[in-house]
């Protein structure tokens, strides 16, 4: 089939001819032959990762491979207990990582749900019902209100047809469709009014169409292809930690090689040297990092859930802390997705719509007419069935104390002339009883008749059909000057992004029968204009301001009209100084130019899914960490491409939710600001832990490097190092993971994407603290070594083991805050930290006093005096940490 044809530029007859079809439909043989070529009308899943591959990716990470090597060496030299302990840790963390990664992407499954199981099709000139999967290009299908469009198609007939395409195009209003019109080649999807697209929903009317594309060739299929092509990368922190892991692995291997070479030159046994190498490898690797990171992210996601943000992928928690731009869809995200009447033009004045107009007869006439010339039905609590625009008119009339039921009782409809896209208006005929017009305006005696025509529609057409106008409650001639004033008011409203409707009436004589547009929609009395818009959510303006104060730039990317986008963006605080860029303009913009464009432009309108991805990619190419919020199918590829995708929980489609990293359960844009705060807290806490862990590991490596110089055997065995790493890195790391927010968490810029985990002097900090830990532990061990015969017992080794743990005990107290002293931060403000410190103390005491555990760890008993000396000397780490913060407070 020809996939390059722009069917929206062809007539219905030309489309049928191009598809080898006709009004009778395809034959069964034609359909069977075609489906062999194009395939079934369904979306195909590609490139799905196998579970075993995900597990192997976790198992063969850099730090894991180094530990596996250490375990193998331990096994070869006969240290079985060390080997199995190391392997147990490796597999534990690989399993944790697997469950974190194994979140099978369900976006395509959600897209498949949008397919239609059965559809009415004409084949061999017979109407039949078949599975939508059997549709092929050229099939003639029948469309009715409530149907989901089964495939992309060119309309052949459209009767009062409106299709809700917001999930695909971003348009907040149902699109009016017509079969006769031809669209230029460069028209966006939202403007192709003679086409219907797979997965969209018929809001009103009926039609007949010929299928032009099926399955992966549809616009929905193209989104599925884009969605599967998007490669999800590592989060900023994951990248930094991966680099850190590689660096630590290199350092560990280098130090091990140096120790082995020096030992061989001194004539030491190879087995002892290999054991030393294993010990260094264990010492340098922060084994607790994967577990602490996972648990910290999980705890952060639980806090976010309490603030109405559901985290689907744990790494998204820390990504939020680094976000520099938020690319937001407009409809349903920044706005209420609910059309609202905002203003009226009554010829002599432009009024803001509100309860104050209740006593204005002219305003009441305008709104009563709009509510009577209306096919929507109010249900309850301002809910309605029907077109969103007409529903909004009913709600507005109710606010002026004119409920739909009362209006319909007083002005019963007797006939109607339905809306069509050629006339762009609708007329209803009503019985007229009493001496007043709808809404209560006093009647001009010359107007008294038995029925009245009420008309609403486009402004230009209505002015041309009007001969008179109501001004100050009186009917007068519509002069050119008055008409010019109406046109000016229309342009003013439209330029603000509002949708504008005109309302007119015509009293009809008793002889007026069989109303048609030709004999009824003439000689009208122009009543006025009303403006409507999908208004911003009340809380969005404050949320945007908070984003800016936190150094986060908000960007609007929408499929809606440029004027509407600009008005909404400006009203809620977005930067509109760079103007509005449309999808058509993006088509002609090179990647290099787009990178410059996104630096200054914050509002994009009439964009397609491909455009959204290009914008996000350009931002990322500039070094930005981009979040993308949205609720429609058209948002899904960009949600997946972004560093963090944020979907709407209430109005969002299943596709957008499954493609996202986070879901806002209350559809409240302000929630993302709260989630960002939590993300920054999580990022800070993980960074605190990494610095805490690396400082401790530097201290242990220094102990291992100084060991061959001062001692006759290893100062710490691999099993002892594993115990220390899991005890301090693991348990104390968990306490840091629930630390409270720093005092400046939302008044500082986002984390620089180019900065490392150890930026702002971090390497100096961990190096100094690590050196202090290493020197205190080695020094105390050396003193005990010299006081006794090391060949008889290894109490000195037990003292090193104990002192390293106590050093990190004090280090944890100072590490709880990057900027505030431990006294200002409060010693007991983190109950988890208090509990973990007590537990560490108890476990360390047990390690040197409880016989079975002491034997397992190959330690010797110590006295209370030894214990006290170790605890007091190690307080030097706390003092060092506090001095460091004091010197860096203004940095």
Image (cartoon, helix red, strand yellow):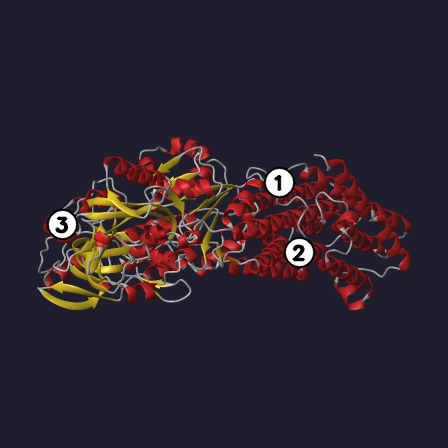
Label tally:
3
The Cα atoms of the two marked residues, 3 and 2, are separated by 63 Å
Q: Is residue 821 left or right of residue 528?
A: right
The Cα atoms of the two marked residues, 2 and 1, are separated by 21 Å
Name the residue beneath numbered marker 1: 748
Q: Residue visible at 29% across and 40% down?
A: 486
Nearest to viewer (mark 3 / mark 2): 3
Q: Is residue 312 left or right of residue 272?
A: left
The single residue placed furthest to the front in the displayed view is: 445
Counting other residues with Cα less than 10 Å from the Cα at mark 1, is it few (<14), some (14-19), or many (20 or more)? few
Q: Earlier in the sequence, mark 1 or mark 3?
A: 3
Name the residue beneath numbered marker 3: 15
Nearest to viewer (mark 2 / mark 1): 1
Q: Earlier in the sequence, mark 3 or mark 2?
A: 3
Task: Identify the secondary structure beneath mark 1.
Answer: loop
Counting other residues with Cα less than 10 Å from the Cα at mark 2, is it few (<14), some (14-19), or many (20 or more)? many
Query: Foreground residue, 284 or 21?
Result: 21
Name the residue beneath numbered marker 2: 738
Residue 750 visible in the snapshot? no
Query: Foreground residue, 296 or 143?
Result: 143
Q: Earlier in the sequence, mark 2 or mark 1?
A: 2
Asked if the residue under mark 1 is in contact with the one under mark 2, i.e. CB atoms within 8 Å, the reply is no
Query: Foreground residue, 554 or 847?
Result: 554
Give percent across and percent down for residue 664: 49, 56
Task: Identify the secondary structure beneath mark 3.
Answer: helix
Give percent across and percent down for residue 277: 67, 48
């Amino acid at each position: 089939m020809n996939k390059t044809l722009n069917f929206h530029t062809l007539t219905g007859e030309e489309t049928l001819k191009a598809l080898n079809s006709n009004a009778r439909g395809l034959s069964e043989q034609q359909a069977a032959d075609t489906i062999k070529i194009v395939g079934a009308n369904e979306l195909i899943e590609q490139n799905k990762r196998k579970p075993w591959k995900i597990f192997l990716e976790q198992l063969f990470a850099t730090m894991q491979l180094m530990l596996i090597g250490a375990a193998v060496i331990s096994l070869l030299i006969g240290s079985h207990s060390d080997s199995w302990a190391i392997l147990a840790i490796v597999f534990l963390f690989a399993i944790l990582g697997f469950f974190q990664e194994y979140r099978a992407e369900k976006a395509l499954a959600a897209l498949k749900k949008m397919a239609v199981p059965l559809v009415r099709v004409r084949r061999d000139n017979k109407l039949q019902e078949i599975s939508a999967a059997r549709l092929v290009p050229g099939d003639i299908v029948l469309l009715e209100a409530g149907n989901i469009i089964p495939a992309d198609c060119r309309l052949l007939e459209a009767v009062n047809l409106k299709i809700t395409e917001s999930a695909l195009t971003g348009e907040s209003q149902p699109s009016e469709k017509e079969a006769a019109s031809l669209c230029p080649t460069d028209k966006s999807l939202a403007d192709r009014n003679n086409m219907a697209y797979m997965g969209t929903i018929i809001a009103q009317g009926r039609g007949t169409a010929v299928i032009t594309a099926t399955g992966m060739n549809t616009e929905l299929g193209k989104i599925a292809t884009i969605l599967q092509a998007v490669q999800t990368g590592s989060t900023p922190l994951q990248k930094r930690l991966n680099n850190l892991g590689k660096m630590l692995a290199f350092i560990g291997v280098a130090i091990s090689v140096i120790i082995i070479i020096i030992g061989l030159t001194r004539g030491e046994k190879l087995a002892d040297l290999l054991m030393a190498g294993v010990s260094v490898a264990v010492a340098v690797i922060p084994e607790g990092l994967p577990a602490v990171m996972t648990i910290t992210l999980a705890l952060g996601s639980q806090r976010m859930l309490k603030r109405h943000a559901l985290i689907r992928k744990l790494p998204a928690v820390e990504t939020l802390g680094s976000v520099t731009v938020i690319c937001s869809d407009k409809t349903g995200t920044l706005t209420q997705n609910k059309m609202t009447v905002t203003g009226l033009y009554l010829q002599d004045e432009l009024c803001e719509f509100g309860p104050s107009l209740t006593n204005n007869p002219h305003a009441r006439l305008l709104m009563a007419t709009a509510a009577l010339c209306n096919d929507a039905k109010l249900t309850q609590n301002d809910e309605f069935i029907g077109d969103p625009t007409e529903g909004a008119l009913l709600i507005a009339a109710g606010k002026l104390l004119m409920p739909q039921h009362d209006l319909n009782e007083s002005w019963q409809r007797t006939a109607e002339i339905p809306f069509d896209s050629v006339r762009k208006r609708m007329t209803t005929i009503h019985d007229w009883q009493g001496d007043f017009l709808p809404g209560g305006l006093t009647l001009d005696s010359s107007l008294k008749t038995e029925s009245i025509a009420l008309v609403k529609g486009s402004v230009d057409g209505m002015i041309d059909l009007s001969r008179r106008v109501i001004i100050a409650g009186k009917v007068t001639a519509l002069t050119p000057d008055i008409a010019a004033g109406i046109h000016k008011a229309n342009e003013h409203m439209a330029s603000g992004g509002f949708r504008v409707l005109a309302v007119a009436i015509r009293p009809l004589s008793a002889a007026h029968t069989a109303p048609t547009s030709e004999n009824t929609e003439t000689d009208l009395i122009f009543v006025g204009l009303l403006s409507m818009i999908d208004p911003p959510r009340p809380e969005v303006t404050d949320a945007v301001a908070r984003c800016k104060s936190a150094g986060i730039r908000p960007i609007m990317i929408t499929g809606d009209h440029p004027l509407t986008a600009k008005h909404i963006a400006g009203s809620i605080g977005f930067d509109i100084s760079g103007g509005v860029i449309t999808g058509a303009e993006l088509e002609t913009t090179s990647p290099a130019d787009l990178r410059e464009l996104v630096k200054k432009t914050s509002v994009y309108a009439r964009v397609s899914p491909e455009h959204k991805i290009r914008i996000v990619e350009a931002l990322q190419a500039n070094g930005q960490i981009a979040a993308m919020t949205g609720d429609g199918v058209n948002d899904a590829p960009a949600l997946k491409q972004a560093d963090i995708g944020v979907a709407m929980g209430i109005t969002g489609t299943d596709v957008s939710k499954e493609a996202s990293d986070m879901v806002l359960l209350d559809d409240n844009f302000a929630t993302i600001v709260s989630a960002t705060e939590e993300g920054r807290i999580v990022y800070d806490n993980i960074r605190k832990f990494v610095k805490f862990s690396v400082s401790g590991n530097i201290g242990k490596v220094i102990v291992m490097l100084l060991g061959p110089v001062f001692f006759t055997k290893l100062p710490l065995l691999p099993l002892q190092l594993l115990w220390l790493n899991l005890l301090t890195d693991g348990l104390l790391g968990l306490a840091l993971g629930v630390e409270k927010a720093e005092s400046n968490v939302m008044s500082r810029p986002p984390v620089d994407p180019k900065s490392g985990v150890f930026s702002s002097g971090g390497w100096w900090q961990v190096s100094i603290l690590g050196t202090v830990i290493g020197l205190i532990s080695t020094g105390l061990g050396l003193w005990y070594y010299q006081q006794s015969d090391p060949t008889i017992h290894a109490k000195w080794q037990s003292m090193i083991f104990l002192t390293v743990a106590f050093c990190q005990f004090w280090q944890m107290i100072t590490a709880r805050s990057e900027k505030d002293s431990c006294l200002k931060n409060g010693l007991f403000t983190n109950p988890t930290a208090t509990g973990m410190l007590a537990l560490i103390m108890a476990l360390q005491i047990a390690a040197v006093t409880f016989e079975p555990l002491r034997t397992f760890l190959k330690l010797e008993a110590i006295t209370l005096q030894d214990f006290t000396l170790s605890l007091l000397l190690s307080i030097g780490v706390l003092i060092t940490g506090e001095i460091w913060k004091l010197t860096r407070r203004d940095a």
